Image (cartoon, rainbow, N blue to C red):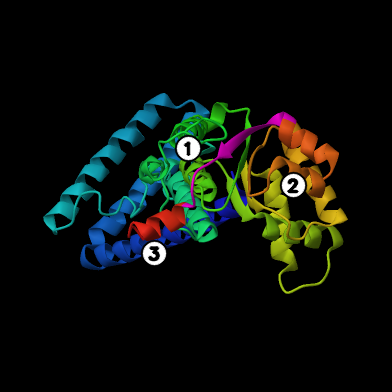
């Protein structure tokens, strides 16, 4: 899990717990003011709990049984009084949003489903802000935008090729936890690379895995800032992003191109790719560059990793954005 998002979820859970404690306090004040006998019952019940615990430690089974019976009788009387005065019998049992963990977020040391839900919500919000694209999903990917006619050079119809690409991406996302594969999306502008990467990101995040989605340019800036620790307005944010890129379950580097290609960024990109491969952390890279263009820009070591350890998916067809505009689908 992403520690930053988990901290956000825990903070929200703590706010919920504080509200529950405040509500519970107000309820007790309300009830005690109207029915003082209930306050007396609560005090006696609390005392009996302590006496029963002491009896259990000393081996006084008979006394412990007596304390238990009296406590049950008092609890029954307490419930009668609550109902008699118009409250539910459980009115003073805690105003918890999640009774299972009493809004602590954990049950017997394990994360409660309520905290997991808050984490998922935080990750979905974070991912939506990063993608800045919309609500991409596999269900809205339109294969009808790819030509059925075979390409004169390759002899393969773009739609046939993209059906294969779509199937691999869908299976990858659906079974991400079992995947040992990294992906390189290669193809021209407007062929669906970013769209399918976003679809994968959403599905993997939905399953609870940590996902970092960044453009290659922003990733390079973060790695440079982290390495040189140059003073900037957001040095802390850059350092944190670099850490998350190294440690997340799935890293998506979108639009790897010619921007910011320096000796440092070549080295940093290789280090990032290599570190994630050896650490069994999955990565997806998208690029408009051909294999030959990439070979001219990046080191042989990086190219060996990308061509040898990544599954390369070729995106083909015509620019979807232009097609949509021509068909009035925008």
Q: Mark 1 falls on what kind of element?
A: helix
Viewer-nearest of discs 1 and 3: 1
- Disc 1 target residue: 158
Q: Is residue 208 above or below residue 168?
A: below
Q: Position of residue 160 (x, y in %)?
A: 45, 31
Label 1: few (<14), some (14–19) or many (≥20) C-alpha neighbours in 10 Å? many
Image position of 17 (left or right of 90): right
| Residue at horizontal 53 percent and vertical 45 percent from the top | 197
Q: Position of residue 176 (x, y in %)?
A: 54, 32
Q: Nearer the viewer, residue 14 or 218?
A: 218
Q: Which mark is residue 293?
A: 2
Label 2, label 3: how far apart the Cα atoms are: 63 Å
Q: Nearer the viewer, residue 1 or 111?
A: 1
Label 2, label 1: how far apart the Cα atoms are: 22 Å
Q: Position of residue 163 (x, y in %)?
A: 44, 33
Q: Magenta part of the protein: which range?
A: 308-319
Q: Say whether disc 2 or disc 3 marks the residue closer to the N-terminus.
A: 3
Q: Nearer the viewer, residue 282 or 317?
A: 317
Q: Mark 2 falls on what kind of element?
A: helix
Residue lying farthest front?
152
Label 1, label 3: how far apart the Cα atoms are: 61 Å
Q: Does any portion of residue 168 appear in the rendered image?
A: yes
């Amino acid at each position: 899990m992403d520690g930053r998002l988990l901290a956000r979820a825990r903070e929200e859970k703590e706010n919920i717990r504080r509200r529950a404690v405040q509500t519970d306090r107000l309820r007790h004040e309300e009830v005690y003011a109207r029915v003082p006998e209930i306050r007396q019952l609560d005090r006696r019940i609390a005392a009996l709990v302590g006496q029963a615990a002491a009896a259990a430690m000393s081996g006084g089974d008979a006394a412990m049984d007596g304390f238990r019976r009296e406590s049950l009788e008092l609890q029954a009387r307490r419930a009668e009084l609550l109902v008699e005065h118009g409250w539910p019998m459980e009115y003073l049992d805690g105003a918890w949003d999640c009774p299972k963990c009493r809004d602590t977020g954990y049950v017997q040391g394990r994360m409660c489903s309520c905290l997991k839900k808050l984490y998922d919500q935080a990750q979905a919000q974070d991912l939506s802000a990063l993608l800045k694209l919309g609500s991409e999903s596999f269900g809205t990917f339109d294969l009808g935008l790819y030509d059925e006619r075979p390409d004169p050079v390759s002899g393969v119809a773009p739609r046939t090729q993209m059906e294969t690409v779509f199937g691999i991406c869908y299976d990858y996302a659906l079974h991400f936890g079992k995947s040992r594969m990294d992906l390189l999306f290669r193809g021209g502008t407007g062929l669906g690379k970013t769209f399918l990467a976003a679809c994968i990101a959403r599905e993997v995040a939905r399953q609870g895995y940590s996902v970092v989605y960044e453009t290659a340019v922003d990733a390079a800036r973060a790695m440079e800032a982290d390495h040189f620790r140059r003073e900037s307005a957001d040095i802390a944010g850059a350092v944190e992003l670099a850490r998350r890129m190294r440690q997340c379950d799935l890293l998506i580097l979108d639009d790897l191109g010619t921007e910011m290609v320096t000796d440092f960024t070549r080295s940093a990109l290789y280090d990032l790719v290599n570190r994630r491969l050896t650490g069994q952390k999955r990565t997806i890279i998208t690029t408009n560059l051909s294999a030959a263009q990439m070979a001219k820009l990046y080191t042989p070591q990086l190219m060996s990793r990308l061509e040898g350890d990544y599954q390369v998916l070729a995106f083909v067809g015509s620019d979807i954005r232009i097609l949509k505009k021509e068909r009035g689908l925008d």
